[in-house]
Image (cartoon, helix red, strand yellow):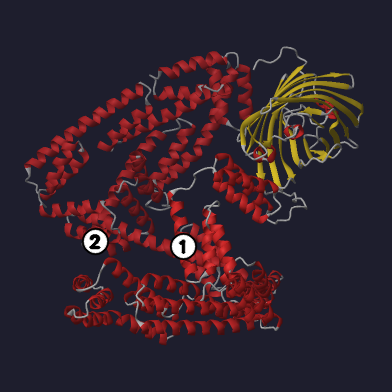
Amino acid sequence: MIPWKRASWVLFLYCSIAGRHIFSNSPVTFLDQSSSARHLSSGGAMMSDDPGQMFYNPAVLQGRIRGRTMSFSYMTGLEFSQNLISAAYAWPWLKNAFSFSFIYNGQSGLEAFDAAGVSQGAFATTELGVALSHSWKVNSFLQFGETIKYYNLDYGPANASAWAISLDAGGLITPIPGVFFGFSFSNIVNTQLQFRNEAEHLPTAVNITPGFEIMRGRARIFYNYRHYLELYDVFGLPAEHRFGMEFDVYHQYLQMRAGFDGQNVTAGIGGNLFQYNYSFAYLPSAIETRFAATFSFNMDIVGVGPFKRPDNIAQSDIEEELVEFYEGIADYNKGNYKNAYDKFTSVIRKNPDHEMATLYRDRALLHLRTSNWLDQEQERLIALHKELANRYEAQANYGDAILEWRKVIELNPIDREAQPNIDRIKESVSTRVLSLHRQGLNLYSSNSVFDAITAFSDALRLNPEYEPSKNWLFKIKQELSQEELKERERIERLQKAELFYNRGLSYYGRKTFEEAIQEFDRALEFNPEHPNALKYKKMAEEEFEADKLGLRGLEAANTFFQKGMKNFNSGQYYAAKRDFEYALRAYPAHDESRSMLPKAEERLAIQIRPFMSNGQENYRKRIFSTAEQNFEDILKLDPDNEEAKDYLRKLKAEKQAAITFHMAEGTRTFNAKDFSKTIYHMDEVVKLDPDNSDAARMLNASKARVETEVTRIHGEALALFEQGKFNEAILTWQRALQIDSSHALSLKYLSEAESRVKQSKFGALVEDFNQKGISLFKNREYEQALGFFNKSLEIDTANATAKQYKEMTLTELEKERIQDEIAALFIGGVRNFKRRDYEAAIDNWRKVKKLDPENTLVDKYIAQAVESQKNRKIIDYINGQKYYEQGKWLLAKSSFERALVEDPSNSKARSALQNTLDRITEERQQFMLEGDKKMRAGEYIAAANEYMNAYRLDNSAESLAKRENALRAQNLLETANKYFENDSQVGLSIDPYLRLLEINPFDKGASERIAQAKERGKSLQQSWMTQAESAESAQDYQTAYAYYRSLTEIDPANTELKKGLARNRRELRNLASVPFKEGQEAMALKNYVLAIEKFNAAIAIVDDYENVQELIKTAREKQEEKKAEQAAAAARAASSSGSGNSGAARSSGSAQDALVNRGIVLYRQGKYKEAISVWNQVPKSSESYSKAQKYIARAKLKL
């Protein structure tokens, strides 16, 4: 939509939808020729307030508009044909506001009838209205307003029209801020409508609307009441109620409204109707905003809400009545006249004064009489009921005959035979009925109540619709006590059952089996447990089926015999027995059936014997549920088994006796407030009778009481516990557990209280033991930790902390034991394999496999050892060839050397060894050349890797030294780049670049960066000087030296800078002397690994400090010699200790050796990170530390 260009205009758009509008089928929608004009206008434009008028109360107009305002609205229905369109224009003037509006309301689908009730077809009405409103603001809390309206109506069937002029008035009072009270009168003054020679006034209504504002005026809650005044005439339109809320969101840019309307309808169709409406609106908050829109949804619902029905409506189910009436209207509109007739009849039965239901039922009946509406099924049922009615009348069952004729009327209300026959039968029995009724009155007056009931019941058997007997029977039964009434009803049912059973026997004896079945059915209706009715009914059904199928004579007997043999062979012995009996009944001389019948009976007895035995045993042990199931299983196999039926009857009787006993005891103990015993007895009742609601109620109540009592005692104990009175709390909780031994909280806190009692004596000591144990546990000193946790538990066996950590400690100890054993066995196997003791190696590795079944690596080792055992002399040569082909020169070299030790005359091995050595030399030189090339190119990491590859081939100090130089160069490059890229630290970058060039003079990047740093430093010399002096004052000689060196590079002739450089260099040398001396001491102690570490620390401070490079080289050589000596000593020790079984391996190694071995196992499995984690646990003071560090370096390279 294109907004208006004038900034002072505001445009409103309204759209409203009404769903399930129940008054679309209200009586005023179905009009006859006498309908009045104001009925036609009762829901139209002159009364509509939602979309039809821009503002409900004319007095509100002045306070709501913002500048000149245009309003357009449209309302339609989802389930009814109504369209309402309106347009309005409003403008302010001083303290006044004016509005001019136009309203159109069109309704279609209305139906007209003449005075005889004949439909005259559908029609439509059109209503037009024009209104002029004025609002005047008297002061800040008072506003008045009025509206003058012109109204015109066009009425379809008569092509008639009418018009009128009316006046509305209203006021709005706001006595205090946030509270408002509105009132208005609609059509308070109006001219008469001239319509078809009739003059009528428009309906006059009063509207009252109190409300208040909340949320600082952003929300309003209101209630509106509308009532129609009887100023001109009685006019039965509904009173209306409306509750609602509207609130503004986003500073009044968005407004939402939600509420519902309640309408109390009184014109003979009473009930509650609620209209729920929801409205979402965009409203302008300033005149510059020129567009607003509203969408609302209204839905009518019947039978809910807070409003009471009118007092003149007598029925209690008023909402159901209202819905049923409108469902009848809907069926009537669709042409379903029979359904409509039934619904209107139901409404009249509930409310005989319902005029509209009576009117429409008569109209529906008129339609039924003039149309052929019965289908074939309905006609068939009607014929069946007529036949039954005639049969019952012939049998003198007059009451049943009347009921059958009444069913005919329900199916066809216009049947010409039904009502005359009902009247005729009533007349024929009227004398007897009256006699029985008087007899009942006499018996009642003489206090023979049950005999009176019998007399009135007999009268109703003759005429079920005789109201005096019905009323007296109802009155007497109300006066009887519940027990007397139940007993009377039980006796009556048994008497009736016996009556119908005897009739059935009579029919059965005359072989009229169909009638016999009907009588047995009626007997079972009154007594489902009749001992013989069910049996004879089955027999009658079988005989009736046999008669119907013609199963009589030899041919039928042969058919039954064949069927019996089939059932016999399939194990269905009861069915076989029954078939043989049928065969003999069809042809008594059938010898085959006679011979097979005892066999079927014998097999059936064998089939049910185990069930009978189990059932009797369970019955003897009083396991009622299982015994009952056993006997029911027997009846599934043999439904005629009288012994099982007898046991079931006994079971039910004893079960009932047990239920009665436990029920009585449970009730007695419940009244005595001994709820624990009540729970026992009622639990037994519920087990025996799960549907016993009284037992379940008392059981739940007792459990609740027990729970309440236990909870109360628990509360007392808890209070004592919190006061520190642990012994008294223990006694109290023990008292609670005597009532409910499974009370979880009492058990929990009892244990806690007992623990606290112990803690009060030894608590500090236990806590000290726990803390020491936890500390040792975290340091992986599990044996000592276990000792402390055991001490804690000796004092306090329930101490949760000690229990938890003891369990964790034992778990870790077991893991360590297994891991240590696996590692020792694995390493022992490797050592044995290297010593050519393949049998011992295989034994070691098989033990590893037993401890660690998922270890796949050891499978390969076992296979290799087995293969090596077979090819002992040539295996090393074969392995050497394999390694040579794979380019694994060091492994090939070792293999060929071992092959020559095994067989010095092996010329092939000697030649292969020489070739391998040549390849090692060539590849080593290639790695070194490639490393030098990478170094010159500034690729320091790649160069370090190449040097490392070379070192692996020759273990030379030169390769290692070059590798360390490459890594140092990479470190210097990263440091220098970091400083260079930071403007505030660029002065620190020159020193590391210069040190990098000392290592690699070919690094052009470093040279270029130095030149750039110098250029940038020319303007920063003073700043660098200040930072150098500041660093020197803070004894940060490394930083000070770097700045002085950078400044010296820029200004080489500056003597002050040279002095500062020399001064800081001396300080650095003093710092480097400390690790240097420590390195010398380590050399003297032959701790070469520590010495190398300290010398490297000195180099990190001053690159060319003393002869540290030579010392590092010497330390490495000494370390290699030491390792060789240790290896020789280990070999000697191993050779002197025999084959080296797993026990010896474990005893000879320390805890640190076990850690190293465990890491080696993980390393060989490819678990490099786990191996590093294990090796890191080796302490620096250990002799195994250097070995662990070496393996860590290898694992990191693998990663």
Mark 2 to mark 1 CA distance (whole Å): 33 Å
Residue 530: tell me if it is visible.
Answer: yes
Q: Residues within 10 Å of mark 1 (few under 14, many from 20)?
A: some
The quarter of the image holding the N terminus is top right
* Residue 935 at x, y percent in the picture: 35, 24
On residue 1140, the disc is 2
Give the farthest residue toward the bottom.
Answer: 620
Tell me if residue 893 comes above or below residue 186 in the rendering.
below
Instruction: Tell me the quarter of the picture where residue 530 sits.
Output: bottom left
- Is 445 positioned to the left or the right of 1195 in the image? right
Q: Secondary structure at mark 1?
A: helix
- Tell me the tag on residue 921: none
Residue 746 appears in the rendering? no
Q: Secondary structure at mark 2?
A: loop
Q: Position of residue 943 (x, y in %)?
A: 34, 28
Picture residue at 32% right of the left edge, 47% below the top: 1163
Give the mark toward the camera: 2 or 1: 1
Residue 768 is situated, as x and y percent measured from the top left of the image, at: 58, 66
Q: Quadrant of the C terminus?
A: top left
Nearer to the camera, 703 or 212? 212
What's the mark number on residue 808? Answer: 1
**541 shown above or below 483:** above
* Dot 1 amino acid type: Met
Q: Nearer the viewer, residue 131 or 714?
A: 131
Q: Residue at x 40, y 73 (%)?
A: 516
Frontmost residue, 497 versus 823: 497
Query: What residue lies at 34% left-to-right and 79% top-to-bottom?
Result: 640
Which kind of residue does numbered mark 2 sit on?
Gly
Q: Left or right: where does residue 587 sit relative to residue 59?
A: left
Q: Residue at x 80, y 28 (%)?
A: 193
* Crowding at mark 2 (Cα within 10 Å: few <14, some 14-19, many 20+): many
